Amino acid sequence: MNQLTLLWTYGYGQRALLAGVAIAICSALLGLFLLLRREAMVGHGLGHVIFGALALAFFLRLSPLPVAIGTAVLASGAMLRLKTRAGLHGDTAIAIFSSVGMAAGVLLVTLVNRFGVDLLSYLFGDILAVDRGETILSILLSLTVIFFIGYFYHQLVFFTFSPETAKASGLKTEKLEAGLTLLTAITIVLGMKIVGLLLMTSLLVIPAAASLQTSRSFLAACLLAPGIAILSVIIGLSLAFAADLPAGATIVLCSFGFFMVSFLRRRRRLF
Amino acid sequence: MSKPEAQVVVKNVWFAYDKKPVLKDINLIVQAGDFLALLGPNGAGKTTLLKIMLGLLRPTAGEVFLFGTEIHAFKKWELIGYVPQTATHFDPLFPATVWEVVAMALLAKKKPWARFKEGKKEGVLAALRVVGMEERKHEPISRLSSGQQQRVFIARALVNQPRILFLDEPTTGIDAETHEQFYNLLHYLNLEKKITIILVTHDIGIVNRHVNKVACLQENLIYHGTHDEFCRSQVFKDLVSQGNHVISHQH
């Protein structure tokens, strides 16, 4: 038991816990909207674009975080534009950006001729290396996400359920969509240290999917999804530290455990 | 007797998708009390025109006025109710009850810190009562049949007490018996609640039973007038000769 709680006594463990919980809240809340709008792969698409941006930052010897945030914001805006102006389906726009981002990343990595430890830590996550600045940014982001969703809650619910009707009733749906996409992009950048770019989609999707299996109201799902995500981070981190496992993967598998419990519970209720 | 209010005015509207014209120089006036069927074959531009009237699509040329105001300056959206063709295409895992779905249209206009007043709650129930769904208010929306869901979406469109209801192919996927009940409900809303109805359909049978105005589209507006004139028109004869289903006039 001591081994499971020992981590929280270290400074890096406390920072990992705070940043992990903050990102868990953001991704679970935003994931609910992504999932119900059938845009679950946004995280995956942006992740690939951010990989390209990180490769560029390493190539040009720039600080990776600002480059990744800037690229993610621009890419999310371009994705929206491609969807609305070019009349492409959401998943087509995501697929285009995703593959171009990854291709650019691979090209840059090959050009620079090294696939350094730094880039790997962003791909697979290194939660115990989260620094003080990243922790503060994660907490600020989670507060922003909670405020955004709380303030526009009813509009977001209407827009997610019936986008066309919401627009025809005078809601500024473009702004709501832009807000959601922008916050998702920043969450992915800050979350890449927690579970890694490759697994970030799972943090956006799995807790939200688990909550939708059992919630009877949208508000209940908004409480349950972050709850599942927070528990996954705490349990995943503890197990990873105690058994010397990779933290990101353990967190994701914990959240999958919660999903299976919700899924089986729903099936038992239905049949 | 004074002339009925022109609630929707479509003026010289053109629209094209990728330079392919879909609507050409459409002029149309919808007056208070109209129950207008927008008829035409698939791809004739019916849904496009409806979306232009609602401001969801911007016309290539021309203007649209709602209650006398140019659509981009129009602010009184509570006067408009809309049930899109895709209303029932929501995610079945969306956790919402019938009551919550109807209340969405009211709550979205509420300031975040304002309380949801009792009168508004009663408004939700009243809208559900009109469509005969009050008893099912606590049921998840995904558990209802398509016909019942369509009734709930009409209740949501009615909850702000609109003066015009826009409906796009509302009976797609609904069985024949429910069809009739559904159109009887629209007939009631038009006659008793004095709600103007604009209905996109390709079912010419509905025209004979319920509507009082018809607009027929095929890129151009090939007919616009009363139901009785429409039944005597060449357009009607052409549509019938193309094999469209017609049921005799009953009202």
Image (cartoon, rainbow, N blue to C red):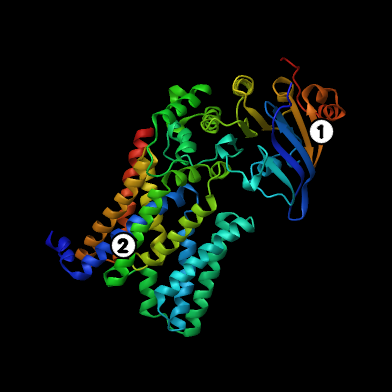
* Screen quadrant of the N terminus of chain B: top right
The residues bearing labels 2 and 1 have C-alpha atoms spaced at a distance of 62 Å
Name the residue type under label 2: Ile
**Residue B79 x/y as whole percent:** 58, 35
Q: Which chain does the numbered disc 1 sit on? A: B
Name the residue nearer the viewer: B206 or B67.
Answer: B67
Determine the residue positioned at 38% across, 49% down. A150
Answer whether residue A28 is visible to the viewer in this image. no
Which of the 4 quarters of the picture holds residue B82? top right
Left-right relation of A194 to B242: left
Chain letter, disc 2 residue: A
Q: SS for tag 2?
A: helix
Residue A262, image x and y in percent? 33, 43
Residue that badge 2 annotates: A139
Judge whether B103 appears above or below A49 on screen.
above
Q: Taking the image as drawn, is residue A37 in sight?
A: yes
In the rendered image, the quadrant that contains the C terminus of chain B is top right
Compared with A120, B54 (above or below) is above
Label 1 CA crowd tier, 10 Å (few <14, some 14–19, many 20+): some
Residue B187 placement (x, y as % from top left): 64, 21
* Secondary structure at numbered mark 1: strand
On residue B223, which mark appears? 1
User: For residue A148, which numbered disc appears in the image?
Assistant: none
